[in-house]
Structure formats: structure tokens, C-alpha cells
Image (cartoon, rainbow, N blue to C red):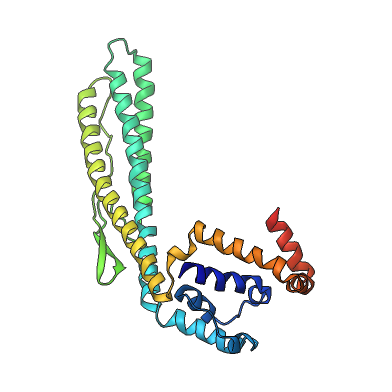
Amino acid sequence: MIPHIIANWGKKLFEFRNILDVTYDSRLVNGAYGGSGISDSDTAQPPNRDRAVAAIRELLTGETAAVRQRARDVSTSISALQIFTDAIETIAEKLVKMLDLVKKTLVPDCSQTQAERMEQQFQDLSRGINKIVSRTEYQFNKPFSGSGKTFSISIGNGSKINIFARDFRFDAQGLNLKTNPQTALSKVNDAITNIDEYKTYLDRQAVRLSDITASIESEIQVAMGINIKDFQPGFAELTADYAASLIPQDKQTSINTQANLTPNEILKLLKDGG
């Protein structure tokens, strides 16, 4: 079957009027995948643009409508999840820096001047965390601020992902790295544990969305009647080789094809080739 497909597809590729006419009858695609081309009587007729466009529109709005809606739902979920993942990762980075500062103050030879400087850095990082918490929101909901609410986002087919409300504010008031570093150390460690648990949850949701995206791609291929294996490099190479082999057999067609190219088309081909 493969040689027959290549022969039919390669021949159609060689007939460049089919390539340059973007409204060429969509049955060519299905014919190539199914192992059969269009009949001679069909190829002798010029493409019916209105019919081709109508067929394509009906296909896109009909068979793939449900799949495309689910794809939009998943895209929305991915965007929302990314907002919270970015915030969690940034907060985690700041907490690690705060932990490092606390550990440095525990060193016996840490001077008062050094401790004061690190104390200031510690407080700055704390304020940075609280700013991130206050501006991380989705549809006016701030789930990390202490007053936000848990909410769900649809991913199609009745499924959803949850963004749980959890307070990630860091209260550094009253903490002193020099006089009471153990208290600061304990509080930072608790915050890191809290953030790591939540990040693990978000990572699981990201994997879930990735699997769903792959499934949607497969569903679109089925709805469109496309076999992705037909687009593998090996098949494309065989098809191109066959199309090239037709040129010596029909030089007049090759000359006519070149003569029919407009200057803009030639320029585009040259640019693409460069």
C-alpha cells in the first residue's frame, strides 16, 4: 500500500497547480491517506472553491467542535495553573534565601554589623513574598492571601482542576536573626515545607494537563481523518524523492510549472530555500 500512496501523493505534488491552489479539493488528503487518489474525471475539473471552503468549514465546526472546545478549556487551565506555579516557585526561591541568611547568623564569628545587614535582607525578602501573595490572583480571587477561596477550573468532559486556597504570607515582624535565630529558622522551615507540598500538588496537575493535551491532539487527528504516521520524515522523504523522479519523465510539466509561478511566489521559494 505504501508505494501506491507515495506514487499518488508524489504525482499530485509534482502537479504544482495543486500546491499553489490552496482550495484544491480536500478529498486529495483523504485519498492519499486511504491509499487511493482522485479519479481522472475529478482531476480534469478545476477546483470548486466555494465547495472546498464550505467542506473545510463544515469539518472544522462540526466533527472537531467538541474537541476544540475542550482544547480551549485546557488552554485556560494551563494559563491559570502557570500563574500560580510561577508565584509558588518565586516564593520558594525567596524562602531558600531567607533560610541561608538565618544559617549564616548562627555562625559564631558572625559580627553585629553582618547580622544587621542580613536582618535587613531577611525583612526585604519577607516583604517580597507578601507582595507576590497579594498580586497573585485569578478572576479577582487571591487564594494565597489568607482571604482567598478555593476554586475550580474546567478542563472539559466534566473534569476540573482545583486551586486550593492556602495562606503563604510570611510574618517576619518580631523576628530577630541575631537575638533569636532559632525561632526564625523554625518559621522559615515550616514555610518551606508548606510551599513544597503545594508545589508538588501543582506539578501533578501540570502532568495531568500535559496528558490531556496529548489526548486532545490524538482526538483532533481522528476527527480530521489524519494519520500522523503519514507525516513522519521517512515517508516525506520517499514522497519527495518520487516527486523529483517525475521531473525527467515530464520536463514540459516542470517548465510550465515554473512559468506559472508569480514573482512573489518565486521570491518566497528563494527565501525559504536560503
Is residue 126 in view?
no
Foreground residue, 184 or 35?
Answer: 35
Q: Which of the image's four quarters has the N terminus?
A: bottom left
Foreground residue, 164 or 235?
Answer: 235
Residue 196, given in percent of the width and then of the height, sits at 25, 41
Residue 200, given in percent of the width and then of the height, sits at 25, 46
Is residue 88 in view?
yes
Residue positioned 34% across, 19% down in the render: 115
Residue positioned 36% across, 77% down in the render: 66
Rendered position, 32 above or below 51: above
Residue 191, given in percent of the width and then of the height, sits at 24, 38
Q: Where is residue 192, by image quadrant?
A: top left
The reply, left or right, for residue 56 in relation to residue 163 is right
Rendered position, 183 above or below 84: above
The reply, left or right, for residue 253 in relation to residue 217 is right
The reply, left or right, for residue 167 in relation to residue 68 is left
Residue 22, given in percent of the width and then of the height, sits at 62, 76
Foreground residue, 66 or 97?
Answer: 66
Outermost residue on the front side: it is 249
Please give the count of numbered marks on the rendered protein: 0
Residue positioned 66% across, 74% down in the render: 15
